[in-house]
Amino acid sequence: MEFKVSNKEYQLKFGIKFIRELDKIYKVDYQGMEFGMGVNLAFMALNQYNPSALSQVVHAAVSHMPSAPSLSTIDSAIEDYAEEQDGLESLFEAVLSEMGKSKVTKSTLEKFKKMAQTDTEQPQ
């Protein structure tokens, strides 16, 4: 998937570096130990159509490039996209779809979806 930032197309890559970058942002503290939960928590935020999470995910997905754009530049590109497309729904859907296709993130997301579905089906 490509995304235009400052009139330049950037290839979004959902690999190990992508995961490491998200793990720096999305952490869970459990009894004093920190665990990176980047893919899972970013996936949840994207499903809630959180624009700041979208920006962070795009930023992490271009981090593999030697001259990746800054987060604030990506923020502006996402705002421009929203103006041009009358919203961000299509971008959220495209990013979620591509994350689900990545050989690196696919199994994590499938397992996470199953766990979330099981949690919502249990009687309270």
Image (cartoon, rainbow, N blue to C red):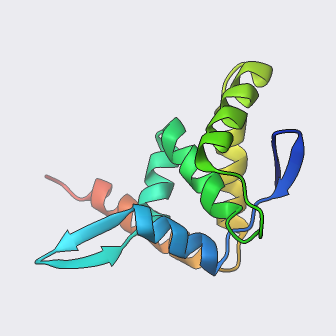
Q: Is residue 117 left or right of residue 64?
A: left
Q: Is residue 111 above or below residue 92?
A: below
User: In percent of the image, x 67 and y 33: which residue is there?
Assistant: 76
Classify the position of the N terminus by image quarter.
bottom right
Q: Quadrant of residue 18?
A: bottom right
- Camera-side residue: 83 or 104? 83
Q: How many marks?
A: 0
Q: Residue furthest right?
A: 8
Q: What residue do we see at 13% from left, 52% from top?
A: 124
Query: Does the image show residue 105?
Result: no
Is residue 52 rendered to the left or right of residue 7?
A: left
- The residue at the point 77 percent across, 24 percent down is 85
- Where 14 sits versus 107, above or below? above
Q: Position of residue 40 (x, y in %)?
A: 44, 64
Location of residue 103 by image quarter: bottom right
In percent of width and height, residue 28 lies at 27, 68
Q: Is residue 68 visible?
A: yes
Percent of width and height locating residue 95: 68, 51
Q: Where residue 68 sits: x, y (%)?
A: 73, 60
Nearer the observer, 95 or 57: 57
| 105 and 33: which is toward the camera | 33
Q: Is residue 36 above or below residue 80?
A: below
69 or 101, which lies in front? 69
